[in-house]
Amino acid sequence: MLSRMRCTITPSTSSSRSSGFTLIEAVVLASLVGIVAAFAVPRFTGLGSSARASAVTTLGANLRSAAQAAHAQFLAPGSPLLGVAMGGKTVSMKNGYPDATANGIRNAIFDSDGFTAIEGAGSVTFIRADAPSGKQCSVTYRAAPEAGIAASIADPDTSGC
């Protein structure tokens, strides 16, 4: 007959394992963080670019609407020929549309925060202030060159947003 042997293991009173990370655990954790960052950073960069491009496109639509609203007020019977009131501001007019000066189209739009306005001959270009390449993240308003010809808004350039 075989006798059964009983073996018991008793835990030792001193612990040889310390609390904390081993070098291997730290390397694995750093690798995982690096992999996640490699995928996440380009996605967040793309979101900023999309937001700037949307702001430029929205400003272009606001310019178009403001110019049409000012022109409609200009055509109303008895309206003054040099300026119309919009949102509590007087908008300077040229040939029936807001002119390209500081008192013209910029008074007609309600919000151009985040944009820098650069005036040219008969035009004003709104450049997104935080864009990586300025002129390639912009929209341009051109005042009416003569009576009977409407003001125009250039297609927004969002290639550098």
Image: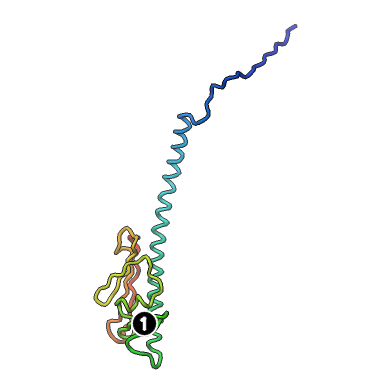
Please determine whether, in this image, residue 156 is positioned above or below residue 82.
Answer: above
Residue at far bottom of view: 78
Residue shown at the point (32%, 82%) measured from the top left: 92
Residue at far right of view: 1
Residue shown at the point (40%, 53%) measured from the top left: 45
Please determine whether, in this image, residue 160 is positioned above or below residue 27.
Answer: below
Give amino acid for label 1: Thr
Q: Which quadrant would residue 124 be assigned to in this image?
A: bottom left
Q: Residues within 10 Å of mark 1 (few under 14, many from 20)?
A: some
Please determine whether, in this image, residue 54 is positioned above or below residue 120.
Answer: above
Where residue 139 appears, as percent x and y from the top left, is 33, 69
What residue is shown with label 1?
A: 90
Q: Which quadrant would residue 144 be assigned to in this image?
A: bottom left
Local SS, label 1: strand
Position of 128 with respect to 1 (left or right) is left
Q: Quadrant of the N terminus?
A: top right
